[in-house]
Image (cartoon, coloured by chain):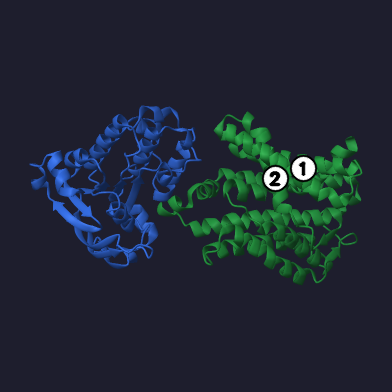
Amino acid sequence: MTLVKFEHVNLHYPALERPILKDINYTVQKGDCVVVLGANGSGKSSLLKLLDGRYKMNSGKILLHDKDIHTISTCTRAHCIHTLTQNAQDNLFLSLTIFENYQLMIKRQGHDPIDSLADYLHTFNPNLSHKLDVLVARLSGGEQQALALALAVLYPPEILLLDEHTSALDPKTAEHLMALTARIIHERHITALLTTHNVNHALAYGDRILALKEGVVHDCIESDDKKDLTAEALLARCY
Amino acid sequence: MIALLLATLTQSLTLIPLALGINLSYTILRATDMTIDGSFVLGAGVFAQLVTMGFSPYLAFAAALLCGALAGSFTAFLQNGGKVDPLLAGILSSFILYSVNMAIMGRPNINLLTTPTLFSTAFGHGNVLGWLSVALLIGLFVIAFYALLQSRLGLCLRAFGDNAALLSRQGYNVTYLRISGFGLNNLLAAASGAITAQIIGYADIGMGVGMTLVGIGAIILGQHILLPFIKKHYLRAGSELLAAFIGIALYFFILNSLLRLNINPIYLKLLLGVLLALFLRTATQKTRLS
């Protein structure tokens, strides 16, 4: 079932000669984990920002459930799409406590509180469970990203946009968080668009791979083709 | 010394709602709202004009609060609809409010010495009862403000000050929050203006000049004295309020001390400005070190 459809999407900044995204056509199926690969400046993050409403495209269409994304209210879009980036300040309220961040999340969603926040957070990072009254700014980078993920999937959104959300972490923490993210995405049947530079992550966790180069779709790798690819081959194909 | 402390206490008391308002804008919404200079006079002017026209002091006070809230909402509108930078929007509102205040008052100052006010009956029975009635009203504002900080709206306002873009992406209506926040902080400034006018016995077009700066300086000062001793995060709201009171009281203590040293009043603001700059410098250095 088609969830998101990009149709002839173009994006350019007035100050730049080259378009950021040029004639993007791509379809995301419900439940897919699509990994978006590409060099810096290839338009990966911009593609995600168009979807969550931070950027507005110059021409083309993005359809969500066959509805033009511009006709969907900000509130509905916020319930449907959640974004995690590498910057903690994009994901969490740093001057509030863990519990206050949780309160803002459940109130926005209009859900009942969960039985035990401490137990829930323990599965993401054991350290978080006894720091509910600690300011988020005082947590380590790994704890912040684990918390951001935990809150993002508390009441799973339909689409999770992961914009290099592990890239600011040390390799061990990044690896752990990436594996956790992939497990949760598959367990909870969340559709995900993930940008990364790590080809091993792309091969291990992505169902499909979309490669961008200088703002255009350079390659689309389906799950069947992906099986036979090595990291080196993928690197050569996408960069 | 007792006279000095008493003067400090009574002067600080009338400016507590203003300190609460500046705490809301500066600490919680993280905006420097210069509208306060104008809405302080607006509160005093609306109250003075209405009571001299024969309206009930209660109605006049309510109207003063409402006008303050409207002034703050106008600043929020300038930021939101007009896409004006928050600091400039406040300066612009304050600039506009000078004319509005003048139009409301009809003259540069209005005498209230012979007009019934909220506290005139209580002061008629003695100064102690009079100041107790002032303290009671201020206490109501403090309790209401504390309840607000602990409410859902209070949490949303804190989140707005922290990261309005994220709050918007989470589906919250940030326009409503901006109007609520700026409306409330100017309502409190107008309350302070109306109370001050009743205590000093007149409303004056120039009585709000520098109020925002004084309030911000006092709050920063109070926070840097008190907050290092507050380790528990759940005491944050209460400690912020207490810091605002300490800061305002310290400001008036210094002001009254300078007056008692027979400093020429012409140089009073110059000296206070220099002292404030020194305090702010110390506060900034402490923040860097911590």
According to the image, label 1 marks what residue?
Answer: B251
Q: Is A92 on the left or on the right of A6, as rendered?
A: right
Q: Do marks 1 and 2 share a chain?
A: yes
The image quarter in which residue B224 lies:
top right
Q: Secondary structure beneath disc 1?
A: helix
Q: Which chain is green?
A: B
Q: Quadrant of the N terminus of chain B?
A: top right
Visible residue check, residue B171: no
Q: Quadrant of the C terminus of chain B?
A: top right
Visible residue check, residue A54: yes
Q: Chain of mark 1?
A: B
Residue B217 shows which numbered tag? 2
Of the image marks 1 and 2, the number of the one nearer the N terminus: 2
Front residue of B15/B228: it is B228
Q: Secondary structure beneath disc 2?
A: helix
Can you say whether B152 is above or below B186 in the image?
A: above
Q: Is B109 on the left or on the right of A164, as rendered?
A: right
Can you say whether A7 is above or below B268 in the image?
A: below
Q: Are marks 1 and 2 in contact (CB under 8 Å)?
A: yes
Q: Colour of chain A?
A: blue
The image quarter in which residue B168 lies:
bottom left
Q: In the rendered structure, which amino acid carries the disc numbered 1?
A: Tyr
Q: x%, y% of residue B42?
A: 73, 62
